[in-house]
Image: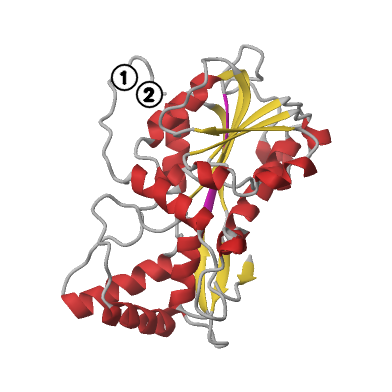
Amino acid sequence: MHISAASRWATPTNSPPSPVYTIFDRDAKERQRTRAALRAPINEHGQRDESKRGEPSRQTDYVRDMGAESLAERLLDIKRNYPTIVELGAGAGHLRKFLDAEGTGVQKLIMCDTSAALLNRDKADDDKYPYEIERRVVDEEMLPFEENSLDCIIASGSLHWTNDLPGALVQIQRALKPDGVFLGYMLGGDTLFELRTSMMLAEQERHGGLSVHVSPMTETRDVSALLTRAGFTLQTVDIDEVTVQYPGLFELLHDLQDMGESNAVINRQTFLRRDTLLATGATYRALHGTPEGYLPATFAPIFMIGWKPSPTQRKPLARGSAEKSLKDVL
């Protein structure tokens, strides 16, 4: 899929717990999301237009909107009613734009995010939706929901910033009722590989070394293993790719900032010299630029579906119980 952007990512009870490594600065990520939600655009006089606070953030909703639309379609395909849906990493409310109230039977959407400012950015639009909307400031690593209490949990593109992803999935699984469903997506795979390779080459050439500027990415096979480890059954994991065309490097970096998706690695370098940025832009254009003069940026959301085990779930047939050979059918 290609988009043009004009201006402007249970541990089983009989197993010992794995150590949790602090990769991301969660407080910094919350501040980034808050600043993005409150940022005002610059007018023709070079001043911030405070009457349009949040507008730059709204203009960069396109990646999250596409992820939320795909999640809404997957939920509709399940053909069940979910009166209450909990959305983690809800942001300003991307899922609600595409949630089919009649098809899913939703009566209440509980939007959860680490940033109160981002949660409430578009609160004035709540009247447009035919179900109740509740907002809660929630950390995905410390879920407040009781065990076996929820029918459906959806994670809208924020799990790639968790330090304890296995633990977060375990908590989600525990909060679901038996036969409850979890749907989500997170950025992974080749997300921003063009930016990563260009920055690495520019820094190597300018400084003779490398520093961390883009978050490490999870692979599809890792997500499947983590769902199994968390106790989910009937899993589905797939990856999509969205390519956004930017006029230049600075437009891409501004968009990532307005998305709240700037780097939050704990040992990140917070300052980039201008000559390094210019070298990154030149390398980016030489390696990945299009004939039309755009810089493509890849976003690769990994979608996942998992079910909490239940005695009523259909089970796969035992090996060797087939009555026909697949070879004969084909």
Element marked by disc 2: loop
CB atoms at circles 1 and 2 under 8 Å apart? yes
302 relative to 274, above or below: above
Name the quarter where the C terminus is drawn.
top right
Question: Crowding at label 1, few (<14), some or many (≥20) Cα neighbours within 10 Å?
Answer: few
Q: Is residue 208 visible?
A: yes
Q: Position of residue 324 (x, y in %)?
A: 71, 30
Q: Residue at x 47, y 69 (%)?
A: 254
Residue 176 lies in what quarter of the image?
A: top right
Colour treatment of the image? secondary structure
Element marked by disc 1: loop
282 relative to 12, above or below: below
Q: Nearer the viewer, residue 195 or 39?
A: 39
Q: Residue at x 27, y 49 (%)?
A: 266
Residue ID for mark 1: 15
Furthest-left residue in view?
Answer: 208
Question: Crowding at label 2, few (<14), some or many (≥20) Cα neighbours within 10 Å?
Answer: some
Q: Please state which amino acid type lies under the numbered disc 1.
A: Ser
Label tally? 2
Q: Residue at x 66, y 25 (%)?
A: 322
Which secondary structure class fits the magenta region best?
A: strand
Furthest-right residue in view?
Answer: 102
Left or right? Give the position of 108 relative to 296: right
Q: Nearer the viewer, residue 135 or 86?
A: 135
Q: Is residue 188 visible?
A: no
Q: Please state which amino acid type lies under the numbered disc 2.
A: Thr
Q: Nearer the viewer, residue 322 or 124?
A: 124
Residue ID for mark 2: 11
Q: Position of residue 25 (x, y in %)?
A: 31, 46
What span is in magenta?
301-307
